[in-house]
Image (cartoon, grey):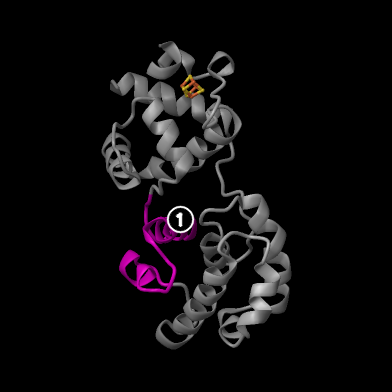
Amino acid sequence: MTPREKKRLLAILATLYPEPRSELDFSNEYQLLIAVMLSAQCTDKKVNQVTPGLFQKYSSFKALSKAKLPDVENIIRPINYFKTKSRNIIATAGEIVSRFQGDVPKTHEDLTSLPGVGRKTANVVLGETGAAHSLPVDTHVFRVARRLGLSNGATPDAVEEDLKKLFPSSEWRNLHHRLIFHGRRVCGARKPNCEGCALKAICPTGAA
Ligand code: SF4
């Protein structure tokens, strides 16, 4: 993709999605980390249905670290892998209290040392908190970036590396959210709406 095409892509995405942001509901860093952990293999909508009850009962890492496993399982039961996620969020809350004075860690290394926190979760949290520039690649970013010819990477990590080389770090967070929006609204997994897509003229898949 030429510099001119990249500029055009960013401009079209910015027009389509002027407010790039997470669709998870959260109002502080505690809620952000827990919501992102719960969102693995699960829709944001479903996570948003269980987190109000969870955060009402446990309003901090300290409170969550003392929670009883069956109580947390009952609250987050509607989401995928609720048993594993319940164990992980309680354990992570405990480690944040004991190792990080109750604050969300600000480095990738520290974040991924927590139970149930992988590369993508750490990237999302770092980007949202502004602790570091990051470009998390979820299923939507992976699919849309490849269809747009931005990467041929076979794994999310490879696609992330390609996108980071193509775009300046100041664009990463917004690009991440805008590619997710586009994947959810237009460039769906099974049936991309190429005819109605504003990116069709610069998309090798849509033009094919
Ligand atoms: S033209 Fe089609 S494949 Fe390309 S981004 Fe748009 S919907 Fe996706």
Q: Which residues are magenta?
A: 105-134
Camera-nearest residue between 123 and 106: 123
Residue at image position (38%, 17%) is 204
Q: Is residue 176 left or right of residue 68?
A: left
Relative to residue 116, is residue 15 depicted above or below?
Answer: above
Relative to residue 142, is residue 63 depicted above or below?
Answer: below
Residue 17 pos. (x, y %): 57, 33
Camera-nearest residue between 125 and 185: 185
Say whether residue 132 is magenta.
Answer: yes
Which quadrant: the C terminus? top left
Q: Is residue 38 left or right of residue 203?
A: right
Residue 134 pos. (x, y %): 38, 51
Q: Classify mark 1: helix, strand or loop.
A: helix
Residue 70 pos. (x, y %): 65, 80
| Type of amino acid under label 1 | Val
Residue at image position (46%, 60%) is 125
Residue at image position (55%, 41%) is 20
Say whether residue 83 is magenta.
Answer: no
Relative to residue 80, is residue 85 depicted above or below?
Answer: below
Dot 1 crowding, Cα within 10 Å, few <14, some 14–19, many 20+: many
- Give the quarter of the image for residue 30: bottom right
